[in-house]
Image: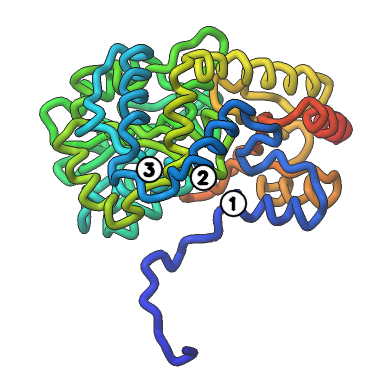
Amino acid sequence: MDSIKAQHKLGNTETSIFAIMSQMSEKHNAINLSQGFPNFPISTELKNRVDYYISNNYNQYAPMPGVLRLRENISKMFEYNHGAKYNPDKEITITAGATQALYTAISAFIRQNDEVIIFEPAYDSYAPVVAINGGIVKYSTLSLPNYRINWDQVEKLINNKTRMIIINTPHNPTGSILSADDMKKLESITRNTDIIIISDEVYEHLVFDNNTHHSAARFKELASRTFIIGSFGKTFHATGWKTGFALAPEKLMDEFRKLHQFVVFAVNTPVQNAIADFLNKRENYLSLGSFYQDKRDYFLNKIKNSRFKPIKSEGTYFQVLDYSNISNEKEINFATHLVKEYGIASVPISPFYHKKNDNKLLRFCFAKTEETINKAAEILCKI
């Protein structure tokens, strides 16, 4: 084996910062506010529905596009929430989590030397998937302090090689959201082009302060060129179930499914059926914004006497904190210091930039029990 010379497709890609910080947290027995997963139980009703379908032998392959009842209920959800109609048979596919949906949507369309615009700081799966398909990433930097898109910069990046633009709202890692004006601007600058949009909306139900989630589905012309990616793992506190979905017009979804069938073919059958049942009660997802806003506010209140400065989260279950009043250390070094010396793990924002921009910012996950938040806040207030 030592004699084999591998031709690396992702030779410069580093281990995910999520994995690095979680491993470090475990090694040092730290409070883990780095990786984005809740540490509280999921709904008993939802667990019972999974048990029901396992016990009643719903344990074989689901249809390749997903369980029809689930696709129908997603269609109803988007019509109710956004006034958008998606055909369950031809325009909705259930995926093995949002990351698989993103991989499939990008891979189905990106060819050698196609250009893809992404916004930094960017979720870390976008750029590697573009690269593995021979595409070229063009970066647009979100403007601090509130992480807004510079649309003049975006327009300058667009040319006849631009094949795709990837947006993310609510945004991981920053917790910012896109406005209706942002979506209309995106609709305008892609008019009369062949540009495909991927709208990563996995935190769609986690929007705070009476703001609205402006899904791409709400903008008819934009929706006609867009894949919308969602995640039931994020929505229902069950990230380990890896169940997500993709919505797109039929012509785009046809191409998506051609690849999807050879990536996973089908997704967990009992979980799909259980989620289909759970979606029948709208309150199961409509209550999530206020639920997580309470957690955000609780966390911010508990650290108000610390030296950290929050960039208030508008959505997701992440809160960015500025530590420039505390240290001049680089983000990765300061984050490491917090784990080893103080027993608390976060995620530095710099790895989400291709040039590792260092702005003295860390991301903390507040999808935790009050007990965990209290312990974490006590530590942060001592730093």
Judged from the image, the secondary structure of the residue bearing numbered disc 3 is: strand
Circle 2 packing at 10 Å, graded few (<14), some (14-19), many (20+), is many
Q: Answer yes or no: do the residues labelled 2 and 3 have beta carbons within 8 Å?
A: no
On the image, the x and y values in percent for residue 216 come to 31, 23
Count of marks overlaid on the render: 3
On the image, the x and y values in percent for residue 285 come to 51, 19
Camera-nearest label, 3 or 1? 3
Amino acid type indicated by mark 2: Phe
Mark 3, residue position: 95
Residue in the image at 52% along x and 13% along y: 283
- 63 shown above or below 68: below
Residue in the image at 39% along x and 46% along y: 267
Q: How far apart are marks 1 and 2 (CA)?
A: 9 Å
Confirm whether residue 121 shows in the render.
no
Residue in the image at 20% along x and 55% along y: 111
Mark 1, residue position: 17
Judged from the image, the secondary structure of the residue bearing numbered disc 2 is: helix
Q: Distance between the residues labelled 2 and 3?
A: 25 Å
Residue 352's disc number: 2
Amino acid type indicated by mark 3: Thr
Amino acid type indicated by mark 1: Ile
**Location of residue 3 by image quarter:** bottom left
